[in-house]
Amino acid sequence: MLVQQQKIQFSSYSSLYDLIVPKDNMLRKINELIDFSFIYDELLNKYCANNGRTAESPVRMFKYLLLKTIYTVSDVDVVERSRFDMSFKSFLEMAPEEDVINSSSLTKFRKLRLKDTDLLNLLIGKTVSIAVEKGIIRSKSIIVDATHTLSRSNPFSAIEVLRERSKLLRKTVYLFDDQWKERMPEKNNTNELEKELAYCKELEKRLEKEQSLCSIPAVKEKLNLLKETIEDTQENFTLSKDTDAKTGHKSADSSFFGYKTHLAMTEERIITAAVVTSGEKGDGPELPKLLEISQENGIDVDTIIGDAAYSGKENLKLTSEQNIKVVARLNPSITQGFRKDEDKFDYNKDADMFVCPAGHMAIRKALQGKKNIGTNQVQTYYFDVEKCKSCPLKEGCYKDGAKTKTYSVSIKSDLHQEQISFQDTDYYKEKAKHRYKIEAKNSELKNVHGYDRAISYGITNMQMQGAIAIFAVNLKRILKLM
């Protein structure tokens, strides 16, 4: 059962807050700045109105999570600090002598009450509306970028998992019949996934012929686990507890396993939109969503500032229709050529390579053709065919037996003369100077509010983590500008 958010109860000790918590305390200022009743209204349908024990106020529970993000502490520590820190108690609207919740309640609140709630857009929209109301946002530019967050779980390549599970199966078999050591197929000593899969399939085939052995529960369990692993080799060839996380690329030589948060931010450093995706997604394709959300949140946009990933043909076409300028360097690989829409190969600006729909990056590229001979030059990107052979998305993309898999872009030097001319203007050069601000904001999210690593599994939990972290940094920024 849920009751309306309780205020500080009358207590002979309530005057302590005025004596102990300074007027300029950040938490006191946040309470004065924002009416948190919108959280109650949003979560009202997640509670029973007339049955069960009285639930802890959703506003107070949300404030616990906000404190946890602002001060980067665990569930246990934020509750413990709320026991003796008077600024925390005041922020939570508790009487000084009132007891705190059990820390396990925060986990239940996240899983039961915040589930299926679009917290990300709700919280960003709320802070942007406050910034607009206070007259803080004056610019008509948004700066866009993406920041990566590591998964809570480490990834393992499919070949590592297959080897570990085939090893467990062999060990179990030897416990019951050590003569099987001489009957096992020859192990694969290469790092080729195709050969490892062939070995595991042969191991499975031989053991299944021995019904007496397979009927032993311990053997049957390990055999079924191996069979499942063979069948479930994922499209990016990694297995992890965090099934939503994917491998992304920070450069041609470095990668990460986790998520990306695509951000839009005003020149005043107020985040106006965010989209959370798995790590392999490209930056450019998320620009339309960031622009749309920013506009829905009340931002009048006439300029978008970003890097080369956002200067793709489709983005330039969209912004041109809305008379919005794009302050982003052109890159021939993504803006000056014809690409088949159905291919959906994404360009990674950090590595200067294309990434296939399965998340694999090209291993090299080559420029073909000569300039000024009447035909277009072509930039060709080459992919690792060993990965293509076992890829579940290979149909229509890779032909069995082919020795190479390439993706080509036709380069046309006169396609974007208007944008090239714009890059030489003083306006472009002046606006480009603001791009560093979003890098600083990404650093704040990661280094101050723990956004460098996911605290839970799954993209839904990642969105929730992002929502509260962005809410915190926006509130802090608003207070500073006021």
Image: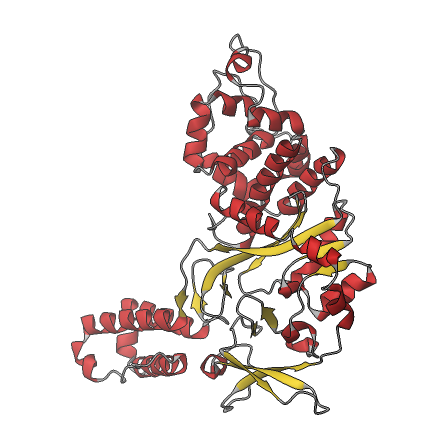
* Residue 2 visible in the current orientation: yes
* Residue 92 visible in the current orientation: no
In the shown orientation, is residue 461 left or right of residue 237? right
In the shown orientation, is residue 224 left or right of residue 63? left
Q: Is the C terminus in the top left, top right, bottom left or bottom right quadrant?
A: top right
Residue 37 image point, x, y percent: 67, 30
The relative height of residue 76 versus residue 13 in the rendered view (above or below) is: below
Here the colouring is secondary structure
Residue 176 image point, x, y percent: 19, 72
Q: Quadrant of residue 414?
A: bottom right
The relative height of residue 266 versus residue 174 in the rendered view (above or below) is: above
Rendered residue at 70%/42% (across/down) = 125
Q: How many marks?
A: 0
Residue furthest top in the image: 12
Q: Is the N terminus in the top left, top right, bottom left or bottom right quadrant?
A: top right
Residue 14 image point, x, y percent: 54, 12
- Along the line of sight, the residue nearer the viewer: 370 or 248: 370
Residue furthest left in the image: 179
Q: Quadrant of residue 320?
A: bottom right
The relative height of residue 14 versus residue 446 in the rendered view (above or below) is: above
Rendered residue at 43%/27% (across/down) = 81
The relative height of residue 426 versus residue 419 in the rendered view (above or below) is: above
Rendered residue at 52%/89% (across/down) = 400
